[in-house]
Amino acid sequence: MKQIIVEDVNIWRLTGDLTFATVGTLLDEFNQRVVATPPQVIDLARVTHTDSAGLALLIEWIKQKTALTFQNVPTQLLNLAILSGVEEMLSLPIKPELKKQSCSSREQSFI
């Protein structure tokens, strides 16, 4: 089953899990497809589960194609990005209340 769906030339949609078990396949698929139809936007609305490997994949994609925007980023992934301090690098749309909540969680984990 394909996890990258190209419904529009500029928009790719990811489906399913974005985890350690799937990122290798997704990276390979991205690298094969990006030559023919490089995306401007990656929509994550259909991502069902993610972990730190998913975050690492997004960072890798940004390194390969800096003019890339992520849409509909799952809260779990936003929290990981905030806790890791990479939300600005990825240009993720962070609601102030989410950033405040995640920062409080990060401070508590160091106490």
Image (spheres, rainbow, N blue to C red):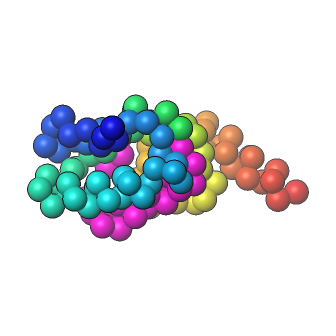
Q: Residue at x 57, y 54 (%)?
A: 52
Could you tell me if residue 90 is visible in this image? no
Q: Which residue is drawn at 60% across and 59% down?
A: 84
* Residue 86 spot, x, y in % from top left: 52, 60
* Residue 89 spot, x, y in % from top left: 44, 61
* Residue 34 spot, x, y in % from top left: 20, 57
Towards the viewer: 72 or 38: 38
Q: What stretch is highlighted in magenta?
A: 50-72
Could you tell me if residue 98 is visible in this image? yes
- Left or right of 24, for residue 77: right
Q: Residue at x 31, y 49 (%)?
A: 69
Which residue lies most toward the front here? Answer: 1
The quarter in which the N terminus is drawn is top left
Position of 9 relative to 35 (above/below): above
Picture quadrant where residue 75 is located: top right
Position of 32 relative to 15 (above/below): below
Position of 66 relative to 42 (above/below): below
* Residue 23 spot, x, y in % from top left: 44, 54
- Left or right of 36, for residue 107: right
Which residue lies most toward the right here? Answer: 111
Which residue lies most toward the bottom here? Answer: 63
- Any magenta on residue 102? no
- Any magenta on residue 66? yes
Towards the viewer: 70 or 3: 3
